[in-house]
Image (cartoon, rainbow, N blue to C red):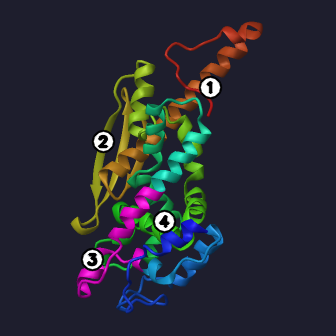
Amino acid sequence: MALQSAASTRADPVNPRVRASQSPGGDSALQRPVDRLAAHLFEVAGEKVDEPLLLRALTHRSYAYENGGLPNNERLEFLGDSVLGLVVTDSLYASHPDLAEGQLAKLRAAVVNMRALAEVARAMRLGEYIFLGRGEESTGGRDKASILADTTEAVIAAVYLSGGMPAASAFVHHLLDPLMKSTASLGAGLDWKTSLQELTASGSLGVPEYRVTEHGPDHKKSFGAQCLVGSELIGSGSGSSKKEAEQMAAEVAWTELNRRAKAVLASAVEAAGPDADDVALPGNTVQDA
């Protein structure tokens, strides 16, 4: 396996002080044993992930700084970003042979972004394995979208360096296949807010309005967002950032407006009877995924 051999030679030297069974400093009660994550990665990718590489991938710069400048996961994050982009681009290219370059780029952007990566990281409870400094730990760093997304990319790189592109591809597909399938229905494909705006524009419904509220202390804020189309509240969402809350609210609103449009179309088709093929809703851009 040339890819595997070549990748392995590029692995960085690692910090021998880090151990899989506990946080490097042994001072985080929230830290889960990393061998559980290693077992999961083996099951998904079909290759054993090099333990020192995995530990490096989980070492946030805040922890590295507080422990004498240990190597952190930023180089792996850099590599993982490219591996992730290649796997997703290859998959979208093969799955959508009729889409133009611009549309493919938008679909990729809907998958390869901080919010999407943070969500898949939460699904696999990745935050519980990250080695964080005390400052980040105390401010909810284990659930910060930026930290989760960056660590996901670093773990992808660790899988790639350990097992080559086949293992990395299997891992990325495991994480993102459901999202890649759903992006075909996203309209603009960039994000939910963009897609919602395109949908409301096509139906002459006006520009969506977002109302955001903040909750909690400064060091651990949470945000709530309401999405209004016209004067009607269509969707609500919450998150650890204003952007995340607005995106969630936009997703709920987009889904609801699509549901309504399809219901109206179904009623119109039923009423039209034999002439159903000629029925079309003015401004309706909703298509089945």
3 and 2 marks in contact (CB < 8 Å): no
The residue depicted at 61 percent of the width and 34 percent of the height is 289
Residue receiving disc 1: 263
Element at label 1: helix
- Foreground mark, 4 or 2? 4
Residue type (three-letter) at the residue carrying disc 4: Ile
Report the Cα–Cα distance between label 4 and label 2: 36 Å
Q: Is residue 264 left or right of residue 33?
A: right
In this rendering, the answer to whether 252 lies above or below 165 is above
Residue receiving disc 2: 211
Q: Tell me the crowding category of disc 4: few under 14, some 14 to 19, or many 20 or more residues within 10 angstroms, Cα based.
A: many
- Pick whichever of labels 3 and 2 is earlier in the sequence: 3
Q: Is residue 39 left or right of residue 14?
A: right
- Pick whichever of labels 1 and 2 is earlier in the sequence: 2
The residue depicted at 59 percent of the width and 77 percent of the height is 48
In this rendering, the answer to whether 87 lies above or below 66 is above
Residue 125 can be seen in this image: no
Element at label 4: helix
Instruction: Indicate the position of residue 132 as horizontal and vertical percent values.
Output: 33, 78
